[in-house]
Image (cartoon, helix red, strand yellow):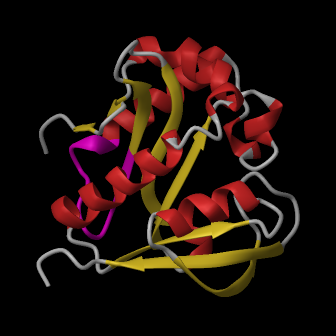
């Protein structure tokens, strides 16, 4: 697969580069992000390793094994403000999950909804999934709103031990189906 660059009205979603480590570490280590995504905590050096891992998966992305994690950047300035990605979610029968976060200073501006919508369309058009899913904690109302704006519907609750967590807990389970080409 060639370089992945997705352009929206206000954003550019692109593959991570090694020199994104400091900016990604700064965004992902904020309490605002760690509240919902505790497994993103890490040093700049650990983040650099994570970016190398992302990079090793871009070319391998296919319908069965998807690990495409992109930097969410502002088109106007190039500033890295968040992350959007898809990947197999082992804790949920290896289904393909979409996940995302944005820095606290850039929340409530529609950026992550714009990014998640574009990532969903890209995944359906390029990797031809039948559906994408997401899991969200019941009190994470902002992420639930993002999913609903992107056409995801709640299909119930699943109790799982999620990555970065120490005990099982309930998550709302969402899905959106691929309508591309139908």
Query: Residue 47: horizontal and vertical position, in percent?
Result: 58, 24
Front residue of 161 and 106 = 106
98 falls in the magenta region: no
Q: Main secondary structure of the magenta part?
A: loop
Q: Farthest residue toward the right?
A: 167
Query: Residue 92: horizontal and vertical position, in percent?
Result: 58, 76
Residue 20 as seen in the image, left or right of residue 148: left
Front residue of 5 and 117 = 117
Residue 144 versus residue 12 in the image, above or below? below
Residue found 75% across the figure and 61% down from its top: 141
Quadrant hosting residue 166: bottom right
Residue 165 versus residue 59 in the image, above or below? below
Query: Residue 174: horizontal and vertical position, in percent?
Result: 56, 77
Residue found 39% across the figure and 38% down from its top: 70
Quadrant hosting residue 122: bottom left
- Tell me how many marks there are: 0
Residue 60 as seen in the image, left or right of residue 74: left
Residue 51 versus residue 66 in the image, above or below? above
Residue found 77% across the figure and 59% down from its top: 140
Residue found 14% across the figure and 85% down from its top: 182
Query: Residue 57: horizontal and vertical position, in percent?
Result: 32, 44
Q: Farthest residue toward the bottom?
A: 156
Residue 53 as seen in the image, left or right of residue 104: left
Please state the extent of the stretch shown in magenta in the rendering: 57-68
Q: Quadrant of the N terminus?
A: top left
């Amino acid at each position: 697969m060639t370089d992945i660059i997705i352009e929206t009205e206000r954003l550019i979603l692109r593959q991570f580069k090694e020199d994104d480590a400091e900016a990604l570490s700064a965004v992902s280590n904020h309490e605002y992000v760690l509240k919902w995504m505790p497994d993103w905590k890490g040093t700049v050096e650990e983040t650099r390793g994570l970016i190398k891992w992302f990079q090793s998966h871009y070319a391998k992305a296919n319908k069965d094994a998807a690990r495409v994690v992109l930097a969410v950047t502002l088109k106007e300035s190039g500033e890295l403000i968040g992350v959007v990605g898809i990947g197999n979610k082992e804790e949920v029968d290896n289904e393909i999950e979409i996940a995302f976060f944005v820095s606290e200073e850039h929340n409530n501006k529609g950026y992550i909804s714009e990014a998640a919508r574009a990532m969903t369309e890209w995944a359906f058009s390029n990797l031809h999934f039948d559906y994408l899913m997401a899991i969200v904690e019941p009190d994470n109302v902002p992420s639930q709103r993002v999913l609903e704006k992107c056409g995801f519907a709640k299909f119930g609750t699943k109790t799982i031990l999620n990555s970065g967590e120490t005990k099982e807990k309930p998550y709302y389970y969402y899905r959106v189906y691929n309508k591309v080409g139908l």
